[in-house]
Amino acid sequence: MALEKNENYFELTDENDRASAIEAQFNEDALEEARRRIAPETSPDFDGLHCIDCGEKIMAARLKLGKIRCIDCQTLKEKQSRVFG
């Protein structure tokens, strides 16, 4: 019994079906968020070697992961996103 995203779960009459549908949607949302977080970043300013924010060379291990910022700039970006949403 697949439900479309944003379907009203309370239209389901069976409690177990409703709980299963809500759990499945929760899991799908969590997977989507995890995929979004680990997806390689892109930028037209990225030259393939240097941080797009400060210009420092990015370590090879980070480049393999598809990162476009050095550790310091990524840390700063994450702190700012927590503060400013």
Image: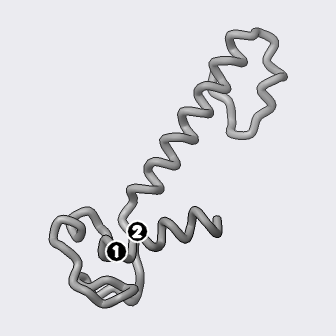
Against 34, residue 22 (above or below) is above
For the point 30% across and 76% down, the residue is 70
Q: Residue 31 bears which disc, if any?
A: none
Outermost residue, left side: 60
Disc 2: CA contacts within 10 A as few (<14), some (14-19) or many (>=20)? few
Q: CA distance from mark 1 to mark 2?
A: 5 Å
For the point 57% across and 62% down, the residue is 82
For the point 57% across and 41% down, the residue is 29
Residue bearing the label numbered 2: 75
Q: Residue 72 bears which disc, if any?
A: 1
Q: Amino acid at mark 1?
A: Asp
For the point 38% across and 56% down, the residue is 38
Q: Whole-percent x and y of residue 76? A: 45, 73
Q: Amino acid at mark 2?
A: Thr
Q: Is residue 61 left or right of residue 4?
A: left
Q: Is residue 11 left or right of residue 78?
A: right
**In the figure, residue 65 lies in which quadrant?**
bottom left
* Element carrying mark 1: helix
**In the figure, residue 80 lies in which quadrant?**
bottom right
Q: Whole-percent x and y of residue 18? A: 72, 18
Q: Whole-percent x and y of residue 12? A: 79, 18
Against 40, residue 7 (above or below) is above
Q: Which of these two is toward me, 52 or 85?
A: 85
Against 82, residue 4 (above or below) is above
**In the figure, residue 75 lies in which quadrant?**
bottom left
Q: Which of these two is toward me, 75 or 22?
A: 75
Q: Whole-percent x and y of residue 24? A: 58, 27
- In the rendered image, the quadrant that contains the N terminus is top right
Q: Is residue 53 left or right of residue 31?
A: left
Is the C-beta separation of discs 1 and 2 under 8 Å? yes
- In the rendered image, the quadrant that contains the C terminus is bottom right
